[in-house]
Image: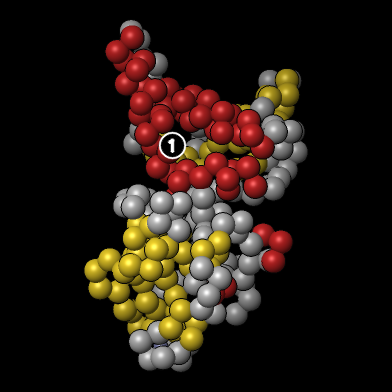
Amino acid sequence: MLGKCKVPHIMFKVGAETYSARVTDGPIIFEGAKCVGVCDEAGREILISPTVAPDRRLATLLTELASALMFEIGEPTGRKAICKFVAVVAENMIRDLAACGGEEALRRLMPGERLGRRTGRIGLLRPRYCRCGGMIPAGEILCSPDVEKPDQVKLQMFCEHCRITLSWNELATFGGLPGGVVVGEPKIEEGRTIPECQIAPQRLPQIFAP
Ligand SMILES: [Zn+2]
């Protein structure tokens, strides 16, 4: 099947809501003026202009997430409330951004692209083996940071020989790559429970692990 790959978008936690983030196809015009970013509260979306230099996208994302949080919970007043507000925005953003590949992935987004599981994908260089002995090519293994466990990475693969999906966690190296040490027992599910994902060669992850 070469259909559209349904990889969920990473959502940024903003108060009780969640927002997604993408780089727009063209410049953003808001109230007659060009702007670098916009927070679309109605669409729960952060839009970043493709005119923003890749190394300024993080600042734009933070600014718009702060704007979104103010919309959701109101403006903080007083030193203590402002400090707490900054901490909430930063804490959520650091964790959510890490799950989709961090600033590196944000910098790599092409116009029209959205941050998601796919952008957070860590490319593997060697195949893995199923318990049945079947080989799963490196390019078909989904590997991404585990947002709930910052010291671990998640790996998932479908074995077409015995038709099971294997999911497991490995301890991450200092650089956030799978370290080969499996945490707990792998989860085994019958059939394919992960999307069949075809990635165009030019969009392959820039981060590779052996
Ligand atoms: Zn197998």
Q: Is residue 1 above or below residue 146?
A: below
Front one among 128 and 114: 128
**Residue most extreme to the left:** 184
- Residue sitting at x 68%, y 66%: 200
In the picture of the structure, the residue carrying the numbered disc 1 is 93
- Residue sitting at x 51%, y 29%: 62
Residue 158 place in picture, x, y as percent: 45, 79
Q: How many marks?
A: 1
- Residue sitting at x 49%, y 24%: 67
Q: Is residue 12 left or right of residue 167?
A: right
Residue 203 place in picture, x, y as percent: 67, 59
Residue 19 place in picture, x, y as percent: 47, 40
Say if residue 195 shows up in the picture. no
- Residue sitting at x 24%, y 69%: 184
Disc 1 is placed on an element classified as: helix
Ligand 1 lies in quarter: bottom left
Front one among 63 and 59: 59
Q: Residues within 10 Å of mark 1 (few under 14, many from 20)?
A: many
The amino acid beneath tag 1 is Met
Q: Quadrant of residue 163?
A: bottom left
